[in-house]
Image (spheres, rainbow, N blue to C red):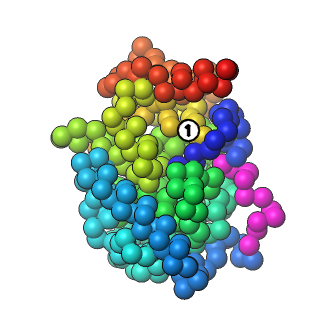
Amino acid sequence: MLQQLKELDTDKTKAKHGLAAGDAGRPARADWTIDQGWDAYTDAEHGVWKTLFERQSKLLPGRACDEFVEGMRNLPIGADEIPDFRRLSDVLMKKTGWQVVAVPGLVPDEVFFEHLAHRRFPAGHFIRKPHELDYLEEPDVFHDVFGHVPMLMNPAIADYIQAYGEGGLRAQRLGVLDKLARVYWYTVEFGLLKQADGLRIYGAGIASSFTETVFSLDDASPNRIGFDLERVMRTNYRIDDFQESYFVIDNLEQLLELAKIDFAPLYERIAEQPDLQPGTVLASDTVLASGNGRYHDAKRAGARA
Ligand code: HBI
Ligand code: FE
């Protein structure tokens, strides 16, 4: 999702994700929502959407999970224009009770959680520029709508993301948001799913990225590891580049089970354990594919040269 040219270490990532939306950008409404301003999109902006939509639609059959494909099929999302959030919300509301609301970009964590807890998905209203198709500093309408909204048509994901919003508010009070954010990252953003015919994508950060769609499934570099909640809560992630490890769930209902767990005792147990680097593989992991790490090794070597 957030692919930046500069390498950031993972401690800064959290700060970036959480603090990027400073007071300077605060809009008039307390919940940070704005009007989408659909009529104001230019032909060039609709054109960027079309380029991204067509590129991704060719790539995703056989790669995105069935639920993603089905969600997309039942939504008013097409190649020709940036979707209208009101029309998306009409369909979503009937199916899973969710709405899409427009925001200017990243919003503060508590604002983000408050929306999710009320089944409102905050979506960036702007679209990336034609010269930065694969480079994003903040989630735009393509990432948020193309990547996230189809999955919100699925009842399990719909409940799971609401529970994340509620859990986010609690985790903030407990000072353990970094732990919970990793669960969101490795599921909603970068999750893979086992299907009868092989691994598929359900994470929005992958599904909206041309290059990571192929990397996450086909490249020999990353690890693909069976999802384990405590393990993931301890694992740092990269916001600046492809993931070094992807975590794989058996089905979307597994996420619903997560939503029922009381995280408080887990936070306490994990507090005594060291954080894990993104590429680490543990003896206790269920390894589906052990990555050769070449992609990130080459980058690290390049950075030293
Ligand atoms: N704001 N618009 C937007 N989109 C996000 O994905 C988002 C955000 N604010 C905070 C945030 N994500 C994360 O830092 C939390 O999930 C922890
Ligand atoms: Fe996202």
Residue found farthest to the bottom: 39
* Image point (45%, 17%), residue name: 282
Is residue 137 part of the magenta span, yes or no?
no
Residue 98 vs residue 130, the one in the foreground:
130
Residue 24 painted magenta: yes
The quadrant in which the C terminus is found is top right
Count of labels shown? 1
The answer to whether residue 166 is seen in the rendering is no
The response on whether ligand 2 sits within 8 Å of label 1 is no
Position in image of residue 54 (x %, y %): 36, 62
Say if 145 sits above or below 296 in the image.
below
Q: In the rendered view, would you say 218 is above or below 275?
A: below
Nearest the camera: 149 or 79? 79
In the displayed structure image, the side of residue 69 where residue 263 appears, left or right: right
Q: Residue at x 31, y 51 (%)?
A: 59
Q: Residue furthest top?
A: 283
- The residue shown at (42%, 68%) is 50
Q: Nearer the viewer, residue 201 or 48?
A: 48
The residue range painted magenta reads 17-27
- Asked if residue 124 is positioned above or below residue 222 in the image, the reply reads below
Q: Residue furthest right?
A: 24
Residue 292 place in picture, x, y as percent: 42, 19
Q: Residues within 10 Å of mark 1 (few under 14, many from 20)?
A: some
Q: Secondary structure at mark 1?
A: loop
Question: Is residue 250 shown left or right of residue 21?
Answer: left
Residue 96 in picture, x, y percent from top left? 37, 68
Considering depth in this image, is 91 or 158 the residue closer to the camera? 91
Residue type, numbered disc 1: Asp
> Which corner quadrant of the image does residue 94 belong to?
bottom left
Residue behind mark 1: 241
Q: Residue at x 54, y 86 (%)?
A: 39
